[in-house]
Amino acid sequence: MRGELRSRNRPGPTDGTANPHHPTNSPTNPIHQFHQLHQFHQILIPLLRHEVHAARTLPLLCGVALGVTVCAVPVVFSLRLDLGAAAVLLHLTAVLGGLGLAFLLDDPATATTAMCPSPWWLRRSLRITTGLLALTPAWILNTALVHHALPPDTRPALPRGDLAVEALALALLVVALALLGLRLTRGGYGSQVAASGLVVVTLTFILLPQSLEFFTAPTDPTRWHNAALRWRALSLTALLATLTLLPRQPTPRR
């Protein structure tokens, strides 16, 4: 009799916590999905806080602040811009934001964080996402300021979509260069390659001939369209480079 009672009290196939085929434990069950999402949230949020705290965010904040200041000057002093000057200001803010983003992936303590249980690509992805999310509202604000500084009849001609693609292309280029720099510096200072590389690329784009130019004024639709195609190709190339370099953890310094 005691043996039968013990066998009845043992968790068997009818126990939902022990039976993987129970409907409650099905991957498609909303309760199971909510439980997985809650576990993921408990892991991701502390990791995100740690990465933001460990990242070099001051250069990014300075780049964002300088970009907003540059775009706010015409509004504060009631200056009117033409389309060419508006494009130059937004190009400048994209470069300033990219320079700040270049320092976000630096990890001076790479020798001690190499054995972290969380994947390297996940930690760097969190930093990249944080940087892009920080640049997005700043870019929206800069575009609104420049748009307000244009004459009312010229404002509809501002190609905000193409300019946003240019800013995204520069940001992805910086991320790819920073990941490459992390491999060259054994996971320490990707900004050594990213910041200097962005400056070199920017100067090169400025000096390119008209047939290969990237920075141009929206007043010439044909030249602007050709430059926009080059920016899209650059953004796609930088994205592929980022996706290729991101899963490869650099060898840490000893």
Image (spheres, helix red, strand yellow):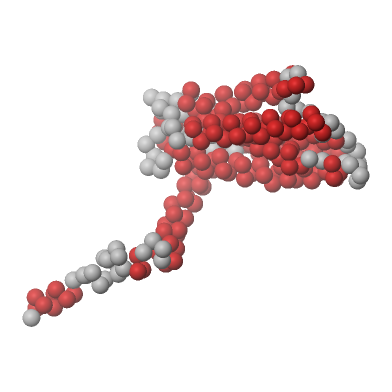
Relative depth, front residue between 220 and 115: 220
At which x and y percent is residue 165?
69, 38
Is residue 77 visible in the rendered image? The answer is: no
- Please tell me which residue is depicted at 41% across the width and 43% down the height of the picture: 118
Can you tell which quarter of the image residue 33 is in? bottom left
Q: Residue furthest bottom?
A: 1
Relative depth, front residue between 232 and 117: 232
- Please tell me which residue is depicted at 70% across the width and 35% down the height of the picture: 166
Is residue 229 visible in the rendered image? The answer is: yes
Q: In the figure, is residue 105 to the left or right of 31?
A: right
The quarter of the picture where the C terminus appears is: top left
Can you tell which quarter of the image residue 169 is in? top right
Relative depth, front residue between 56 and 196: 196
- Please tell me which residue is depicted at 45% across the width and 35% down the height of the picture: 247
> In the figure, 213 relative to 170: above or below?
above
At which x and y percent is residue 171?
63, 35
At which x and y percent is residue 52?
54, 43
Relative depth, front residue between 192 and 19: 19
